[in-house]
Image: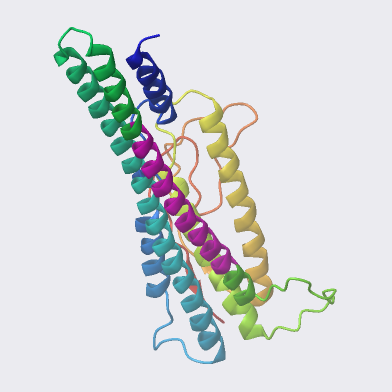
Amino acid sequence: MGALDAFYTTWSQARTTFGEGAPTTGDSFDGSARLREMKSTMESAAPDDRWQGTAAQAYAAKNAEHAAVYGKLADLDQRMATEVSRAAGVVNAGRQNLEQIQSWVTSMDASIPPGQSAETMRMILARRGLGQVSDTVQRSTEEMGAIGGRVDDIRREYDEVAGETKKAAGWKENPPPVPDEDDRTHDEKVADWLLKWKDLQAEVQDLWRTRPPDGTPDGPIVEAWRERRRELMKKQGELAQEAAELGIEIGGTPPPTAQTPTPRPGTSNIAPAGLPTTPRPGPTSVQGLRLP
């Protein structure tokens, strides 16, 4: 084995550790824009001067808590995306450095004149090349380690936000048995219901945005969309029943269904107001709420 054979073998092994293809950046993980949009939506839903009283105050407080959670999640999402992009940058830099090292060694090898000292010069060249490969791998490993530490910190902050959300909702780590009677006041129940209804409206909007295009053949994507629609139909029915018990009147107009295609056997195009049908497009129906 020649002096440079060991270098090329080691170089090839090091290059393999950096993988192939373009590394994934944080763009595909960054949901901060959508989360900030949801934060703005929650803030715009704060009660105005037309609604006063303890129910309005309770709703405003919980609405503000929800908006703050969306803001924190948006910041965390953006930070996580930044770290993913940094990791991609480390991979690209490592690949480029290895390519430059190989090119330099190959060029230097070609310039070594023949003679008794040629093999000695190649041994020196191989050692220098191996040292540069080692430095590149070590530097990349250290940078990835630092990124991993920051990612762990972000994950802990995600967990903290989740804990704050549960605490705001009244969750406890080891809650006592829940009594049968609900000791919340009527105003508190109304405020909780309004938040759940607002969340449902956001989910319905997402459902419209992800509606499969007309003519999409049946498959996993279409079936997953239909399953999500069934879940929201059930949730809407449950909230409607709860609204009736609380004395809340729900108003609104469902999306137009006059031109809805004839459903297949075993399916239905009839849906509660605000929920889209498959595959008919249409605007999201935003339900109006009138308190008693």
Residue 149 falls within the magenta-colored stretch:
yes
Nearer to me, 150 or 65: 150
How many badges with numbers are in the image? 0
Residue at 22% from the left image edge and 22% from the top image edge:
103
Q: How is the image coloured?
A: rainbow
Q: x, y (%) of residue 28?
A: 38, 43
Residue farthest to the bottom? 53
Residue at 47% from the left image edge and 55% from the top image edge:
151
Classify the position of the C terminus by image quarter: bottom right
**Where is residue 37, by image quadrant?**
bottom left
Residue at 39% from the left image edge and 37% from the top image edge:
137
Is 193 placed above or below 213 here? below
Q: x, y (%) of residue 117?
A: 22, 14
Residue at 28% from the left image edge and 17% from the top image edge:
120
Residue 255 falls within the magenta-colored stretch:
no
Q: Is residue 30 visible?
A: no
By secondary structure, the bulk of the magenta-drawn segment is best described as helix
**Where is residue 248, by image quadrant?**
bottom right
Classify the position of the N terminus by image quarter: top left
Nearer to me, 280 or 79: 79
Is 60 placed above or below 122 here? below
Specify whether 30 is left or right of 56: left
Residue farthest to the front? 116
Nearer to me, 262 or 228: 228
Q: x, y (%) of residue 265?
A: 62, 26
Is 129 placed above or below 56 here? above
**Where is residue 168, by image quadrant?**
bottom right
Q: Is residue 58 visible?
A: yes
The magenta region covers 133-162
Q: x, y (%) of residue 92?
A: 30, 36
